[in-house]
């Protein structure tokens, strides 16, 4: 699961790992297992990923993983793969074809609640609007109002309740004035599906 966010704690973690980063692209990934720090860990075709590790409780920087080119750098035993455990975050800065894609913070599921938004304060109707907006284009192939129609089909929401919830989502900056979902709204919707709200 990947979430795009502007939360202050996420920015603080990102800038702890990469103090020179002044961009606005931040996202959180929830994963288990091992981080392969050799993947794209050297410049090739204008692309590279830098890896840092930070402790969640103290925000102590554990250090950047050095470049690990298979030809020009000696292998670093123990630094090629790092087990992601609770309390340890992998912070990545990625470039692709010369473009800075921003910061990704990879966390263990046990730590995810500290970095992910609380969805309990949003109503069922608001969640339906956000999920449908995230999941569907509103017009396609000559059809219109697709988001509401799909939401109504899967959840039974009425058009009046849809419009009310949509307006509330705009006021909360979960949707923009044109009705498109914002990063905040996308994070609230997470990976949920409409059928979960039947």
Image (cartoon, rainbow, N blue to C red):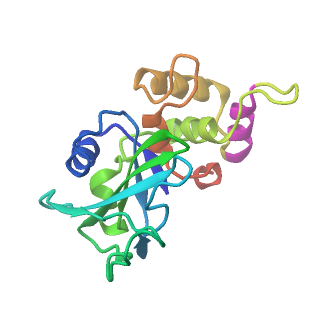
Q: Residue at x 60, y 29 (%)?
A: 162
Q: Position of residue 174 (x, y in %)?
A: 46, 30
> Which residue does the image show at 51% across and 50% down from the upper left?
47
Q: Is residue 32 visible?
A: no
Q: Nearer the viewer, residue 68 or 3?
A: 68
Position of 20 with respect to 155 (left or right) is left
Q: Nearer the viewer, residue 81 or 169?
A: 81
Q: In this picture, which residue range is highlighted in magenta?
A: 145-154
Position of 69 with respect to 105 (left or right) is right
Residue 134 x/y as whole percent: 60, 39
Q: Main secondary structure of the magenta part?
A: helix
Displayed quadrant of residue 128: top right
Residue visible at 52% across and 46% down in the picture: 46
Q: In this view of the protein, which residue sits in the foreground, 140 or 47? A: 47
Residue 49 rendering spot, x and y as whole percentages: 43, 55
Q: Judge whether residue 16 is colored magenta.
A: no
């Amino acid at each position: 699961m990947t979430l795009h966010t502007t939360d202050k704690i996420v920015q603080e973690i990102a800038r702890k790992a990469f103090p020179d980063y002044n961009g606005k692209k931040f996202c959180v990934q929830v994963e288990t297992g091992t981080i392969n720090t050799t993947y794209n860990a050297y410049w090739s075709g204008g692309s590279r990923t830098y890896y840092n590790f930070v402790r969640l409780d103290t925000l102590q920087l554990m250090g950047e993983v050095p470049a690990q080119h298979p030809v020009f750098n000696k292998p670093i035993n123990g630094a090629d793969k790092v087990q992601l455990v609770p309390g340890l975050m992998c912070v990545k800065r990625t470039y692709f074809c010369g473009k800075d894609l921003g910061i990704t913070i990879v966390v263990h599921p046990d730590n995810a609640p500290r970095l992910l938004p609380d969805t309990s304060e949003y109503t069922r109707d608001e969640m339906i609007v956000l999920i449908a907006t995230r999941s569907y284009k509103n017009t396609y192939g000559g059809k219109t109002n697709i988001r509401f129609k799909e939401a109504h089909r899967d959840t039974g929401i009425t058009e009046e309740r849809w419009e009310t919830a949509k307006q509330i989502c705009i006021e909360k900056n979960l949707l923009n004035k044109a009705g498109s979902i914002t990063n905040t709204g996308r994070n609230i919707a997470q990976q949920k599906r409409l059928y979960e709200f039947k």
